[in-house]
Image: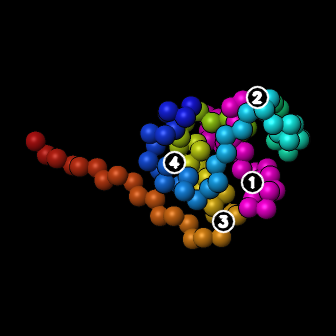
Amino acid sequence: MKEKFSKSVRLMDLSDRFVMIKAEKGKNKALNEKKFEPDGTYVPRILFFTSDGRFIVESYNRHADAEKEHKYFYVQPSQIVESMLFVLKEYGNEPMPVMFEPERSHLDY
């Protein structure tokens, strides 16, 4: 997962606006709290929290091809970017980042 997502420029740019933590449940008893298991104990999953530690329930994978039974599981970097933009828009204290699409070259041969 890490290797695939680290190749996404958009994801890497947005990650500067978040505190990102990789947590392994077996190594930290605090992770047994219900707020870390909103729809089960499956891994991997990505959860978003406010700066004061409140879980953002509505920040799940809303992509059309997302797994409905695993709302916080992401397959593609674009799915995470979508959730990150949602969180920044709804909960961010800074202006939204401007996202540019790469220009396409129209060459006539």
Q: Residue at x 13, y 46 (%)?
A: 108
> Going by the image, does 109 lie left or right of 10?
left
Q: Quadrant of the C terminus?
A: top left
Please state which amino acid type lies under the numbered disc 1. Answer: Phe
Asked if one can make out residue 69 in the rendered structure from this viewpoint, the answer is: no
Q: Earlier in the sequence, mark 3 or mark 2?
A: 2
* Res 90 quadrant in image: bottom right
Residue at which label 2 appears: 42
- What main secondary structure does the magenta stretch of the protein show? loop
Please state which amino acid type lies under the numbered disc 4. Answer: Leu
| Nearest the eye: 105 or 45 | 45
Q: Residue at x 86, y 41 (%)?
A: 30
Spatial separation of the CA atoms under disc 2 and disc 1:
18 Å
Q: Position of residue 66 (x, y in %)?
A: 65, 35
| Nearest the eye: 101 or 55 | 55
Please state which amino acid type lies under the numbered disc 3. Answer: Gly
Secondary structure type for disc 3: loop
Spatial separation of the CA atoms under disc 3 and disc 2:
28 Å
Secondary structure type for disc 2: loop
Residue at which label 1 appears: 49
Kindly give the residue lying farthest to the front in the view shown: 27
Q: Position of residue 53 (x, y in %)?
A: 80, 57
Residues packed near mark 1 inside 10 Å, few (<14), some (14 to 19) or many (20 plus): some
Residue at which label 3 appears: 92
Please state which amino acid type lies under the numbered disc 2. Answer: Tyr
Asked if one can make out residue 36 in the rendered structure from this viewpoint, the answer is: yes
The scheme the figure's colours follow is rainbow
Q: Which residues are magenta?
A: 43-68
Secondary structure type for disc 1: loop
Q: Earlier in the sequence, mark 2 or mark 1?
A: 2
Residue at which label 4 appears: 11
